[in-house]
Amino acid sequence: METENLSYSHHPPYKVGVPPKQKLWKEFSTTLKETFFSDDPLRTFKDQSGSRKFILGVQAVFPILEWGRSYNLAKFKGDLIAGLTIASLCIPQDIGYAKLANLAPQYGLYSSFVPPLVYAFMGSSRDIAIGPVAVVSLLLGTLLQNEIDPVKNPFEYRRLAFTATFFAGITQATLGILRLGFLIDFLSHAAIVGFMAGAAITIALQQLKGFLGIKKFTKNTDIISVMQSVFGSAHHGWNVPTILIGATFLVFLLLAKYIGKKKKKLFWIAAIAPLISVILSTFFVYITHADKKGVQIVKHIEKGINRPSVDEIYFTGDYLLKGVKIGIVAGMVALTEAVAIGRTFAAMKDYQIDGNKEMIALGAMNIAGSMTSCYVATGSFSRSAVNFMAGCQTAVSNIVMSIVILLTLLFITPLFEYTPNAILSSIIISAVLGLIDYEAAILIWKIDKFDFIACMGAFFGVVFISVEMGLLIAVSISFAKLLLQVTRPRTALLGKIPGSNVYRNIQQYPEATKVPGVLIIRVDSAIYFSNSNYIRERLLRWLTDEDEQLKADGLPQIQFLIVEMSPVTDIDTSGIHALEELEKGLQKRSVQLVLANPGPVVMDKLHASKLTNVIGEDKIFLTVADAVQTFSPKFAEEV
Amino acid sequence: METENLSYSHHPPYKVGVPPKQKLWKEFSTTLKETFFSDDPLRTFKDQSGSRKFILGVQAVFPILEWGRSYNLAKFKGDLIAGLTIASLCIPQDIGYAKLANLAPQYGLYSSFVPPLVYAFMGSSRDIAIGPVAVVSLLLGTLLQNEIDPVKNPFEYRRLAFTATFFAGITQATLGILRLGFLIDFLSHAAIVGFMAGAAITIALQQLKGFLGIKKFTKNTDIISVMQSVFGSAHHGWNVPTILIGATFLVFLLLAKYIGKKKKKLFWIAAIAPLISVILSTFFVYITHADKKGVQIVKHIEKGINRPSVDEIYFTGDYLLKGVKIGIVAGMVALTEAVAIGRTFAAMKDYQIDGNKEMIALGAMNIAGSMTSCYVATGSFSRSAVNFMAGCQTAVSNIVMSIVILLTLLFITPLFEYTPNAILSSIIISAVLGLIDYEAAILIWKIDKFDFIACMGAFFGVVFISVEMGLLIAVSISFAKLLLQVTRPRTALLGKIPGSNVYRNIQQYPEATKVPGVLIIRVDSAIYFSNSNYIRERLLRWLTDEDEQLKADGLPQIQFLIVEMSPVTDIDTSGIHALEELEKGLQKRSVQLVLANPGPVVMDKLHASKLTNVIGEDKIFLTVADAVQTFSPKFAEEV
């Protein structure tokens, strides 16, 4: 018979270690470091000279100085092609997205000019494509129009948009500087999947206005209001030529997308299709004078590059606070999207992204944007994927795109005058459909039901109520899940795996046998104020249940309660109280409390609170097997 | 050499169990039950006839029907003495506490008449003494006067007070009915200690007005405003006779308290001292006409019992929402206090308290109170302790107290006319000093530094800003702690304890030895969206650090990363993604990922996501020892 434990009959059980007492400052700084500097960002600065440290510091803020030194023509070739491709994709998207944000079309283009340039110098992702994106545009538009009517007061509206953009940037940069980047981790993957899909549906529904040529359209974004608008105007509001143009090109775009998906090599067809649609449809409208037949067109895009807008930002007054609030929300959502993209592609190409540094870059680019007539820009899922597939090598592809947008603004915006709105709607619909990741939703359902609830909550919240509400639901459910974890931790009944001295959950290993007269329970969480009462009561209930069962079977009652503490990583004052009360309650029932494998922090606190004396040092063991060996040696030998 | 693991050279390692697949509904209902019905409240209803179930149901709502049947004269003797004792203590306290809530003195007495009666029928604690308490009175007074000036609009103020009381009751009962009682666990023990001490200081400072006889006094409760008021009026506002009376009796009260504390048998001296002070000082003022010399007196207490006030509650209008908000806050704080008291004394006498049922009782009593001119009542720390020491047996002591208050209201309130306010202030000061539990604060410091920060945050928040702010700080810090736990879980490097096959944290057991070429890390938390990225990055950093160290020492690099999953009780979709990415990252470094002892839920999800295929079933082991035996058999045999 071979045994796991150390408690043979001839020597005492192995003593549970108490870690050497740490200095208060040491303990504090370790916690601080683990919380805010877990990625050890200063690693490269170690053991360097002063001037070298300065260079490394500048390089840390502007990574282009680092990777730029090994930049070469081969890389530029990849970046050039990728940059041209994403430029062709983003021009029509930008014009459409600006509309989602209730801004004139040129602001979309502006936002694809300055922010990508800034990002290229400061960002660390090699694959992200920067610019306005559908979800953030919709969110920003919704939040802004709750405050100011964009039709009646376009100037104030635009000023508030720049204010929100400025504070979105400040929020992002601040989170990065304070190393609070982990806050965005609180939006769970599942919630994002649901939110994105809901936003995609909402955006697609909004496009029905342009797609069907409806003039009077609801300002609400929920599906019911939109459907009422659509069918309420069915008799007199729909414009047949518009629908024909829109539908034709939508089919074309979806087909191009399908081909691009089927044959990865032909991805460029999907990438170039929107621009082709714009060119063809614009030409068609121009020669057929379809605009005279009720086909709505873009009409006017201002020519020329971004004007400075720093004097338009509200730094005082009522709108300041509103701008801050909207900026924080839009900034956080934009951040979530950009970081998710950055991480995804970094994992694909296996390079590291420093989340906090990335946030500073995104923040800086939006601050710069807000001063040059741009609204909130971030990383776009669809364009980043195209960028990646087109073979981008570095952030230079963003510079190329930015230059193409510059040329567009300088020379060819007037050509978009006759572009029908229906085409922009078709382009947006085809773009946002890619945000509906139903495969991820199915996987979530399979893996975690609670995650699925969060996903669906966010989805239906966005679709049936509003974008903000969906976001709120997503965050709330995510939080509820975390709180549930810390309030109702699992406890498991352990048994001995036959032929070994290993004790495991008897639910997972039904062949494991219970030790007569001994109840072994594993507590699966740190014991904190939020769960200490629950854990105490739950342990007593395990005991009551087991005793009742034993009584019914005519077997002797439980004499020892062994609490397996391996997963209990920490305990606080409430937890210590709970253990103390548990010990008292057990004493009244003539049951002895035994602890197995308390960790370093727990041992430290058990000693600090003198609870070790109450429980007895001889009741604290290294392993469950040791404890069983001591209190039920016969069983330990036999089974 | 004896070994823990099962993987001898002649048979394969023990297979990790996959629990039988649960039906979705079963899984859902188990989670639901564990969350909301963890105390199994329907246990007694099992296997009973219909009529018996009905009786049990009625008894569940009115526990008096259950314990009343075994009530006897011996028990009544204890309850009578205890009831009379707490009545003598609560009469002067009530009058003083009503002032804290900016209400006329009789409302304090009213609140000690109806709510205790209702509680006696519905409550399950045998030791709690119900009535107005200092902290809730102060909180309610502060919140109410933010909305309505109690001096200018006393009627509206009173109406809002009843409205808040009504909704405090609704809040409490609702939490109980929905079985959301665990929500109050989110206020940590440490935060409560700090909040209570801060509130005690604040209340004591407020008493300086009555104690020094100052007429113009600040409405703010922070220490700076109060001190300005006190010293600003030092030259002309202080009244010497008042101070003399107040100081004399404060010394008497503190002395009585000291004696009661030193000799437990003389606790009644402390209990009866306030009433004696009131009687003596009232008599003294009456015969010396001290009220003519500027000694402020109670002047008027309305005679007669509570009038119905249901028509004074705001059920419509602007004040409804304000009443609801104040009611929720006051109700939650009152609940926290009552439940803490109930639990403390139940643990002392070893009986069970059903938290949710208790909340329904407290809620019902405040709803009834709001309709009979009472303000928020709850369990009082000081009076419950006296009740306990005076030998109370059941809630009948509350009925006795209630009857004494009834007689007081009917016959002797006019006698309080000449009671000096300074005496009431002295009584309150001596009462609230007991809320400053500095010993608990020292213990908290010793056990958990983060808890101490929460404690001090709440304390200084209350003392330097306001009661609400202190409460907010307490709740925020408590939450931050929980979030920190789920965001930055611990990871530990494991080594083999010599002479065994047990693997433990080498920080706790410095004698444990590392396995060459194998890195063993234990992850100490469920892997959720909030920490999945951190855990992935942290594991990689452990690897990088270790490899660097090994390189420096000229030793071979790590080939296997064994992740000890025992504490990982759950994993969600984000966690699965993180593991997947970890696996990819390790592959690039030619390191193999090995899992040890994943629990039932984790195994289930690893299978659902097909991640077991990616990692390989042969890389998942029952114990770390098994894994080491397989990949480093030489080491396992030797050390």
Image (cartoon, coloured by chain):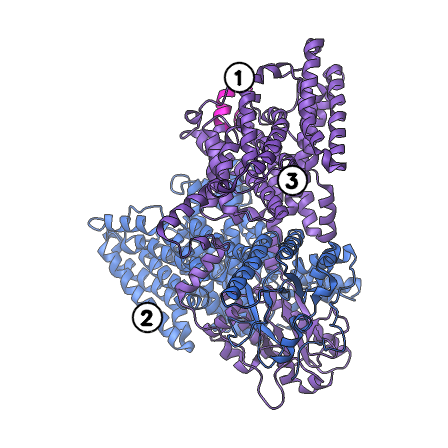
Chain colours: A purple, B blue
Image quarter where the N terminus of chain A lies is bottom right
* Residue density around tag 1, few if under 14, some if 14–19, many if 20 or more, within 10 Å: some
Q: Amino acid at mark 2?
A: Leu
In the foreground, A209 or B168 = A209
* Residue with the mark numbered 2: B255
* Residue with the mark numbered 1: A303
Mark 1 vs mark 3, CA separation in Å: 36 Å
| Residue A583: x %, y % from top left | 56, 75
On whether disc 1 and disc 2 are found on a single subunit, the reply is no
Image quarter where the C terminus of chain A lies is bottom right
Figure quadrant of residue A392: top right
Report the number of discs: 3
For mark 2, give the secondary structure: helix
Q: Amino acid at mark 1?
A: Lys
State whether residue A532 is above or below residue A340. below
Q: Amino acid at mark 3?
A: Phe
> Is residue A159 magenta-colored?
yes
> Is residue A358 magenta-colored?
no
Whether residue B113 is visible: no
**Earlier sequence position, callout 1 versus callout 3:** 3
* Residue with the mark numbered 3: A195
| Residue B372: x %, y % from top left | 53, 50
Mark 3 vs mark 2, CA separation in Å: 65 Å
Tell me the subunit letter for badge 3.
A
* Residue density around tag 3, few if under 14, some if 14–19, many if 20 or more, within 10 Å: many
* Residue range highlighted in magenta: A146-161
Residue pictured at 45% horizontal, 49% vertical: B140
| Residue B33: x %, y % from top left | 70, 59
In the foreground, B1 or B467 = B1
Q: Residue furthest bottom?
A: A10
